[in-house]
Image: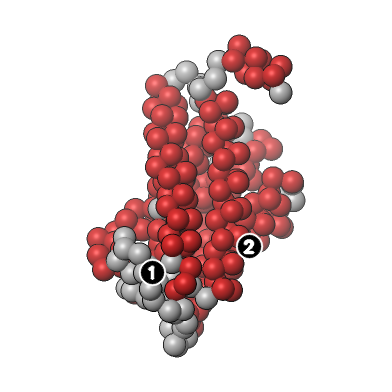
Amino acid sequence: MESLQGRSEIWPETIAQAPVGIFIILLSAFLFYLSSLVTTRLSPTGAGYCSWRWKNISISFLHACISGPWALLCFLDTPKMAEDLISTYSSFSYALISMSVGYFVYDMVDMVVCQRTRQSLELVGHHVVIIACYMVAVTTQLYVGYAVVGLLVELNSIFLHMRQLMQICALSRKSGFYRLNSLLNMGTFIIFRISLLAWMTRWIVINKDSVPLVFYSMGSIGLAIMTLMNITLFYRLLRSDFFSKKDKERVSKQE
């Protein structure tokens, strides 16, 4: 993925495709809502008060399974997009971004209506920032490639949400499947969250002369929030899945 240093600020020339993107967003949000109704009926026996969490994480898992591989396919479908993350895009990649915005809109509304906890409100704030940033790509048809790179994070989310679903189902943490998922979760976390966010931060800094200040500011704020959340999440995962009980007690005493 090449640097665009030396190019002047790139501003949108048309928003002709924006209505198509908005239609996909609304359709996506509606389809995820319908999926949530089906998922609610499939809630495992004994989920009890976790029934909403089961539904919410199941839909997040569904989105991750769709958007993660789709993001990879976008670069296989349009290799030139890797060379120009600002102007180059395809209908395939544009549809992905619009679909994901629809998911974030659905998930945000679902949390506001059904689960107003502190953790949910933090995620709502995250979703607001992501929606604002991705709507730039939807309305201007610029930075679609950069947004697709961001969705590669969902390749890790597949294992992250699978872990949460297994916990709701009370699967033993000593089981082979849980341990395998934990290893895949941490491996993909390092690659598709920590390393990827570091690369995205480096890219936006290197190419800041090509990015208008308003878009640069939005992207920088979004990356800062995501980086902070992911560092915290990484620590929690390490402590939960890889520290022994004695290690946890020792860390707690040190804190």
Element type where label 1 sits in the image = loop
Q: Which of 138 and 79 is in front in this view?
A: 79
Q: Quadrant of residue 132?
A: bottom right
Q: Distance between the residues labelled 2 and 1?
A: 30 Å
Q: Position of residue 95 (x, y in %)?
A: 40, 70
Q: Nearer the viewer, residue 244 or 159?
A: 244
Give the amino acid type for the residue marked by disc 1 in the picture: Gln
Q: Nearer the viewer, mark 2 or mark 1?
A: 1
Q: Position of residue 163 (x, y in %)?
A: 50, 34
Q: Quadrant of residue 105?
A: bottom right
| Residue, disc 2 | 128
Which comes sooner in the sequence, label 2 or label 1? 1
Q: Say few, some or many: other residues with alpha carbon within 10 Å of mark 1 (under 14 / 14 to 19 / 20 or more).
A: few
Quadrant where the N terminus is found in the figure: bottom left
Element type where label 2 sits in the image = helix
Residue 222 vertical position relative to residue 78 in the rendered view, above or below:
above
Q: Position of residue 5 (x, y in %)?
A: 38, 69
Q: Which of 121 and 228 is in front in this view?
A: 228
In the image, taking residue 227 as reference, residue 98 lies left or right, namely left
Outermost residue toward the front in this view:
6
> Which residue is painted at 60% across and 45% down in the image?
229
Q: Say few, some or many: other residues with alpha carbon within 10 Å of mark 2 (under 14 / 14 to 19 / 20 or more).
A: some
Q: Nearer the viewer, residue 214 or 131?
A: 214
Give the amino acid type for the residue marked by disc 2 in the picture: Val
Mark linked to residue 5: 1
